[in-house]
Amino acid sequence: MAEKEKNEELENDVKKEEKVESKKMKKEQEIVPKSEYDELDDRYKRILAEFENFKKRSGKERENLYNSILSDVVAVMLPILDNLENAAKVETKDEEYKKGIELVLKQFQDTLKAKGVEEIKALGETFDPELHEAVSSVQDDTKGEKEIVQEYRKGYKIGTKVIRHSMVVVAN
């Protein structure tokens, strides 16, 4: 029993010492100078702001890269779309064949539209050098100045980025 009491006393002493040490550590931790605290707080806020800016910047870069790659792929496929449109315009005796071409053309156009590719409006619009490429001009008093009267080749864009300019004939 004496041993048991000694063990209990030792345990109590150890607990008391741990409490005293823990109080000392808390006091030491609380005695951080205000200037050091302010400096650490300022560094934390700056690093947090820097990280937020990094997330925004990398998101924009990722989106720009995606649009750039998509526009490169679409630009390669546009001549195929032009050929399908020309094939759909040709008169043929086989109506089922023509219907098949038109279905493939519509599917192609729907896929491009789903990816954000838009056709640039040209006929009747005012000439815009950022969207259109003038290949010829005609004098026509019935048309307005710089009005597009004919389109040789359709233009396409993704958002504000032009993939291919419209080739047009401009009046006056």
Image (cartoon, helix red, strand yellow):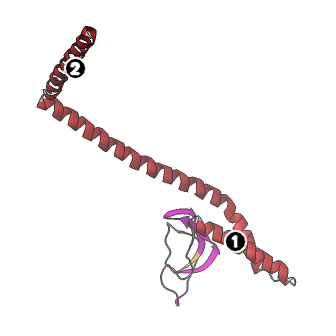
152 within the magenta span: yes
Near-viewer residue (163 or 6): 6
Residue 104 drawn above or below residue 145: above
Alpha carbon separation for disc pair 2 and 1: 78 Å
The total of numbered circles placed on residues is 2
Near-viewer residue (164 or 29): 29
Query: Residue 15: which disc?
Result: 2
Near-viewer residue (60 or 8): 8
Sequence-first tag of 2 and 1: 2
Name the kind of residue labelled 2 in the image: Lys
Question: Residue furthest toward the bottom?
Answer: 142
Query: Residue 107: which disc?
Result: 1
Q: Quadrant of the N terminus?
A: top left
149 within the magenta span: yes
Query: Residue 135: which disc?
Result: none
Residue at horizontal 57%, vertical 80%? 123
Q: Position of residue 105 (x, y in %)?
A: 72, 73
Residue at horizontal 81%, vertical 83%? 91
Question: Residue furthest toward the front?
Answer: 1
Under tag 2, what secondary structure? helix
Under tag 1, what secondary structure? helix
For the magenta stretch, what is the residue range?
A: 140-168
